[in-house]
Amino acid sequence: MLIEVKRKWFTDRSTVGVMTLDGYFFSYTMEDVARAEGVKIYGKTAIPNGEYSLTMQHSPRFNRILPKIHKVPLFEGVLIHRLNYAEESHGCIGVGLNKARDVIWRSGDAEEMLCKKISEAISGRGELVCLKITNNPT
């Protein structure tokens, strides 16, 4: 399964994008501010563009199984989970079914659906799951 995050809307508070699963729209995304390569402000910087592998792992912080993004340069413990604002991110990617400037919502629904689809791909069909992140401003 290929999950793509195309970052589209950039503000001084957040980065909002579109997530597709195997080429089909899935949700909107919310991240911290996308900064120049190699620049990181703890808790306020989106992960770098690139390709990453994903697995489903238990998060002690959230006490549930979530998609974990592996081998992110300068970051550790990066997840995809529900959130509404970039300030809740700390480098993670939030998913939501609706968006506005600097906010997404219906994120719980999006997280549950995403976890189900990734789990089905990994456990049900034995697929590898890859995440590709690019900047595609509108």
Image (cartoon, rainbow, N blue to C red):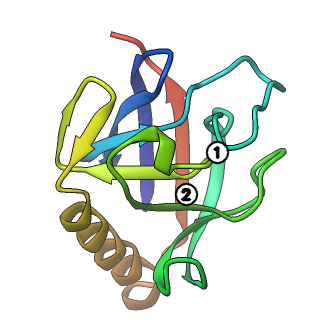
State the residue in front, 110 or 44: 44
- At a point 32% along the width and 48% down the height, the residue shown is 84
Decide if residue 123 is in sight here.
yes
Q: Residue 135: x, y in percent?
A: 51, 21
Q: Toward which corner of the image does residue 43 lie, by quadrant?
A: top right
Q: Residue 20: x, y in percent?
A: 31, 45
Q: Is residue 86 above or below residue 137?
A: below
Decide if residue 25 is in sight here.
no
Amino acid at dot 1: Glu
Task: Report the residue marked by disc 1.
Answer: 51
Question: What secondary structure is marked by label 1?
Answer: strand
Any mark on residue 36, and which?
none
Q: How many marks?
A: 2
Image quadrant where one finds the N terminus: bottom left
User: Mark 2 touching mark 1, by CB under 8 A?
Assistant: yes
Amino acid at dot 2: Cys
Question: What secondary structure is marked by label 2?
Answer: strand
Q: Is residue 30 above or below residue 26?
A: above
- At a point 39% along the width and 82% down the height, the residue shown is 119
- At a point 54% along the width and 43% down the height, the residue shown is 132
Task: Report the residue marked by disc 2.
Answer: 130
The crowd level at tag 1 (other Cα within 10 Å; few <14, some 14-19, many 20+) is: some
